[in-house]
Amino acid sequence: MSSTTAAPAPGGTTITFHPEFRVGTVDRRLFGSFVEHLGRAVYTGVYEPGHATADDHGFRQDVVELTRELGVSMVRYPGGNFVSNYDWEDGVGPVEDRKPFLDLAWRTVEPNLVGTDEFLQYCERTGIEPMMAVNLGTRGVAAAVGLLEYCNGEAGTRWADMRIANGREKPYGVKLWCLGNEMDGPWQIGHKDAHEYGKLAAEAGKAMKLVDPSIELVACGSSSMYMPTFGEWERTVLSYTYDIVDHISMHAYYEELNGDRASFLGSGTAMDRFVERVVASADAIGAQKRSDKKITISFDEWNVWYLESRFPGEENLPIQRDAPRIIEDVYSGLDAVVVGDLLVTLLNHADRIPVACLAQLVNVIAPIMTEPGGAAWRQTTFHPFAATARLAQGAALDLRVASPSMPTTKHGDVPTVTAAGTVDPGTGAVGLFVTNRTDTEQLVTLRHPGCALRIDGGTAVLADHEGPREGKESAESYVPVEVEAPEHGNGTITLRLAPESWTAFSGAVEAAED
Ligand code: AHR
């Protein structure tokens, strides 16, 4: 325990904790990530035959080790925008017979060295659950059904037999399927309006569930809350697909623009509002249908991405080949704090968000970077994700956070302190995740009436002011700070939060008090 006597400032933040007040269960698929055929995510990212650490299949084991340390449970594949012009048939069968094609999403020549079998077998070897997407841009129902049958079908039908002929007897049993990607976006190859997409997704989904009723389907929601069609898109798409799909997707990327640090630090609140709006749209359709079913959210792309300030736009990319460097954002301490805070939002909605993917895993807006033929390393954003995946176990708690607010230009007033908590009902282990968005130290009162709570200490990421940390040495010199056990009082604990920080505390519920 800390020996310093701490007294929270009057009007400061109070968090009330009780292990029985729960939001829902933390689904392990909340700690998913994403590998798209984009830039160096696949080639020289996860896959680099000839690399000193590559296994017999050409997959880099230094990246596998870091992926394990990151705690990634699931990986979405093969896109992203890429999937909307991808012919999956080109990526299966003998590698020497596969032909390169020009991917129009990223204007890159795709060599088709890695395809469905290579990806799914990599997932099996590493214990990661795959999440697959079908092409509803340039393809449709038949290609979606064919790919599902190729992956999950038993011997005796065309596509399942093709998989067997390609050397894989046992079906892969892929459970989670995205019905296209960002079909609301004009940049999407095969972009559709909400009626066109809703009808197509309903037909593809219906047919896919006839092939394998055990799968879960994700309909495309809006590609951001700021799309002009947001809201109406969800309403229309779900009016066609409500009874067929299980989840609706959400995508959100945040960045610091024009030095507006406060708005950037408030991104978690924007994400929170986005979730509440999508849930409201889905529930409105459910109510209209008098349905007891609840559509949940697959937040299958979220991250910090300097999209407006650093990305030139796909139409301005030259046609390239050989795994070009595309959107290799370099992250700062501030970015790590925001990533931690976005995880707070995801945990607080555990009842409605069972699936989420940090976009992406390697090299492309990623927590893990590699050099071709060289090292792999952790970016700053690696740390909050790894700590949360490790500590957030069991039930997500309904913490009551009473916090002063701060003004932001982009999101209006946002709380200065945010928090999420978890408890493992089996062991009593507690995870507590707290963000201080202010530029001063905050003393936070953690009340735990009616239960004996112990907080042991934690690990924090700080928004240092060094800016993006380019390269292995600079990125890896950024390490999380150890936080001492806080001062425990009678029914309260005082948490000391560094300025602009995100902290993951561990602890335990010791015994129930009557
Ligand atoms: O993650 C990068 C891109 O962002 C994805 O391909 C697309 O779905 C989104 O716009």
Image (cartoon, rainbow, N blue to C red):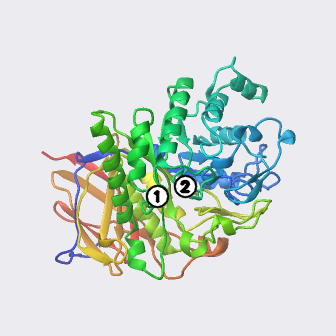
Residue under the point 72% across and 60% down: 107
Residue 392 at x, y percent in the picture = 40, 51
Residue 58 image point, x, y percent: 77, 47
Q: Earlier in the sequence, mark 1 or mark 2?
A: 2
Q: Residue furthest top?
A: 156
Give the residue type at disc 1: Ala
Residue appearing at x 50%, y 27% in the figure: 214
Q: Residue furthest right?
A: 96
Mark 2 neighbour density, 10 Å: few (under 14) some (14–19) many (20 or more): many
Q: Quadrant of ligand 1?
A: bottom right
Q: Nearer the viewer, residue 462 or 169?
A: 169
Quadrant placement of the N terminus:
bottom left
300 sits to left or right of 167:
left
The residue at 30%/69% (across/down) is: 417
- Quadrant hosting residue 241: top left
Residue 353 in view, yes or no: no
Give the labeled residue for mark 1: 387
Residue 101 left/right relative to 132:
right
In this figure, which residue is indicated by the disc labeled 2? Answer: 70
Image position, residue 313 (x, y; %): 62, 68
Q: Return the residue nearer the eye: 352 or 441.
A: 352
